[in-house]
Image (spheres, rainbow, N blue to C red):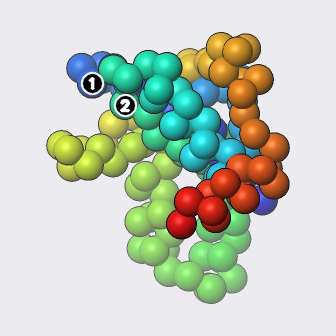
Amino acid sequence: MITWTLAYRTPRANHFKRVTNWSGTWAQAYYLAGELMKDEPGLQVYYVQTFQSEKDQNLRLACEVAERKISLDLAHSYLEDHGNILVAETKRRVKMRETGTLSDELVARALSADEAQARYEKRS
């Protein structure tokens, strides 16, 4: 299962800080990203896979290449974005570092997986 977290930076920073003290579902990360942007409007905030999810995906891709389920080129195209965020405004990949944390107050505002999914579906 893929787990998600947040990554953030000030617009002039040369890297993103991937959050290490919280992870959840995609819908939970989507909600919490909105909350962080309300609290810190000057930050660029993205919801991203956790470092562990990226490591797990690397292993799965290696197995799929070995079993000839996917090509090596396809695996490389997936891996190119691991550890990076493609910033839409600049169209450049920016490195993530595992140095981000969220305040206890913000973590406490995270919704349960079911509630976050229901809110996301209601929004659509």
Q: Position of residue 20 (x, y in %)?
A: 67, 26
Q: Are marks 2 and 1 in contact (CB under 8 Å)?
A: yes
Observer able to see residue 52: no
Residue, far front: 122
Q: Which residue type carries mark 2?
A: Gln
- The number of numbered badges drawn on the structure is 2
Observer able to see residue 39: yes
Which SS class for mark 1?
loop
Q: Position of residue 54 (x, y in %)?
A: 62, 49
Residue 40 location, quadrant: top left
Residue at mark 2: 44
92 relative to 2 in the view: left or right: left
Q: Which residue type carries mark 1?
A: Pro
Q: Residue drawn 56% across and 18% down?
A: 99
Which part of the image, by quadrant, shows the N terminus? Answer: bottom right
Q: Nearer the viewer, residue 97 or 30?
A: 30
Residue at mark 1: 11
Indicate which disc, 2 or 1, sits on the residue closer to the N terminus.
1
Q: Mark 2: few, some, or many residues within 10 Å (few <14, many ≥20)?
A: some
Q: Residue drawn 47% across and 26% down?
A: 38
Q: Mark 1: few, some, or many residues within 10 Å (few <14, many ≥20)?
A: few
29 relative to 78 in the view: left or right: right
Q: Position of residue 10 (x, y in %)?
A: 33, 20
Q: Position of residue 6 (x, y in %)?
A: 56, 35
Q: CA distance from mark 2 to mark 1?
A: 6 Å
Which SS class for mark 2?
strand
Q: Residue drawn 18% across and 43% down?
A: 90
Q: Nearer the viewer, residue 60 or 109?
A: 109
Q: Is residue 82 above or below residue 42?
A: below
